[in-house]
Image: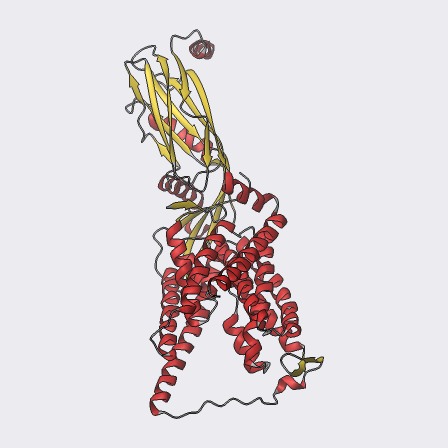
Amino acid sequence: MKALFFAIIILFSASPFSSSSVISDIDKSDIELSTRFDGTSLLVFGALTLENDSTSLLVEVVGPSTSIYIRKKVQVWGIWVNRKVAQFQDIPSFYQISISNPEHPVLMKIKNQKLKSLFYDFLETNSTPVDGNGVEQYYDELTRLKKKLGKLSTFEEQVDIIDKKLFSYKVNLPKKIHPGIYKIKMTLIDQQGIELSKSEQSVKVSKVGVQEFLSYNSKKNPVFYGLFSVIIALILGFSAAQLFRWLYR
Amino acid sequence: MQIFLPIADVPVDLFVLLILGAAVGFLSGVFGIGGGFLMTPLLILLGIPAAVAVATEANQIAASSFSGVLAHLKRRAVDFKMGNILVIGGLLGSAVGVEVFRIIKSFGQIELFVSLCYILFLGSIGTLMFLESLSTIQRSRKSVNTIKHKKKHNWIHGLPFKTKFKSSNLYISAIPPVVIGFIIGILASIMGVGGGFILIPAMIYVLGMPTKVVIGTSLYQIMFITAFTTFMHATQNKTVDLLLALILIVGGVLGAQLGARVTVKLKAEEIRILLAIIVLLVCLKLALGLMMTPNDLFSITYGSGS
């Protein structure tokens, strides 16, 4: 009976009839990665209706998935060698989560749930269990390194709410980002962290020009790319010889 | 001006790369060396992944050696038969080297492997050059002339498959050139060097070739081997950064032309001591990089699929 009661509440509160709602837009829908790309920022903004003062806005930015290796160096005969490795599969290359109310009571719970569900999917490839705490350690190092690279941020950025009606949020993307679809999810949550209303935007990040041509062909047409590199080098070598013969005639 | 290298996947300053290319090109013009053995470790120290530095440098050398071989063709200073036999050995060596490279890379140890090769190699070459120049300076002070080179009938002449090399005026076995070519192919593919500093002495002292065809023939072989190595790295390891190669070629061509035309007011031995010191410094920097406790014991690499 109690379970049914809660189910009804959740169903009702998440329905469009709820008095909390959020709508959003974004200042650009495409980001071009050229050879000159030096990082950029996105502005997400919108309008919201808050049921009461305890309703908070949660913003998440999720980049395309990648698989990565975390390697640990150990000292062998005086030199540092990559020894242990853990592989993480299908984790977001970029992840940011922020909230309008930094004093929200279940903040830590939300954070841990989100991070575990997104980043905890990994395989240990050859980690020897010498130091005992292998698994946890790699997960901790993954989140630490991601933060250091500017690709993971948890409740460090500010969500601005104006007059309890409008919101704006700025996303800073570092210069080294993966191409793909970046999703920006806006969620209104209540005091217990229960979702009240959602809105989602997406941005397409793609390589362009020389960047696109070289990285695409290098991966997809390696034979063409190899021949192309050699021919370009030979043409340049030939031109240089001709140019200087002409200059110093 | 920052640019983002598409294959190396790192942002670098365009002017730093151009100046680096020009500086190494200048040194190669002054010293008459290829420069690959300085450029590859410098690229690594600049933060370019070792696998990309090696493959891309092979691409640059293909350009500079082609440019050089054209000049020597005009002077008819290329022994084509010898060159072709060296190329056969070199292609084999390069194919083997690229495969070894790929295997080591798959274990995540390529940075270490390339660094170790360079430390060993720059350390020994630098030390040898330094000692030799020192003794030459001392000898010239005593003004005793002991330079003596005579073609000897050595073990080379006992090997089978003898053939005639017209331009070099030699009648020797084809085995030593194939073996020498093979070694150069290995060096080109795992270190991103032309290998002239080994090839040229080997041609003179082991094969007994006359000096007038040595440079042209070595450039002829190096051009084929580095072109092939570039192609193999592009297809096997996907580590050739053409944008980086272009920048280095432009910088290198300008620097080399300046270097070849600048009159250096130093004696040959003093120049060589200077070069030896540069080589030893680069070696030391690489060695320190391996021995000092890294700032971060953990590192991220992105796997395939995205």
Identify the residue shown where x is 44% and y is 33%. A116
Which residue extends farthest front? A249
* Quadrant of the rendered image containing residue A175: top left
Q: Is residue B133 above or below residue B258?
A: below
| x then y, percent, for residue B66 | 56, 63
Residue B192 in the figure: left or right of residue A156: right
| x then y, percent, for residue A73 | 42, 54
Which residue extends farthest top? A17
Q: How many marks?
A: 0
Q: In this view, does B46 lie above or below A23?
A: below
* Quadrant of the rendered image containing residue B137: bottom left
Can see residue A88? no
Coloured how? Answer: secondary structure
Q: In this view, does B296 lie above or below A95?
A: below
Q: Nearer the viewer, residue B18 or A20?
A: B18
| x then y, percent, for residue B49 | 46, 53
Can see residue A164? yes
Residue A21 in the figure: left or right of residue B157: left
* Quadrant of the rendered image containing residue B151: bottom right
Residue B213 in the figure: left or right of residue A195: right
| x then y, percent, for residue B114 | 48, 61
Identify the residue shown where x is 62% and y is 61%. B95
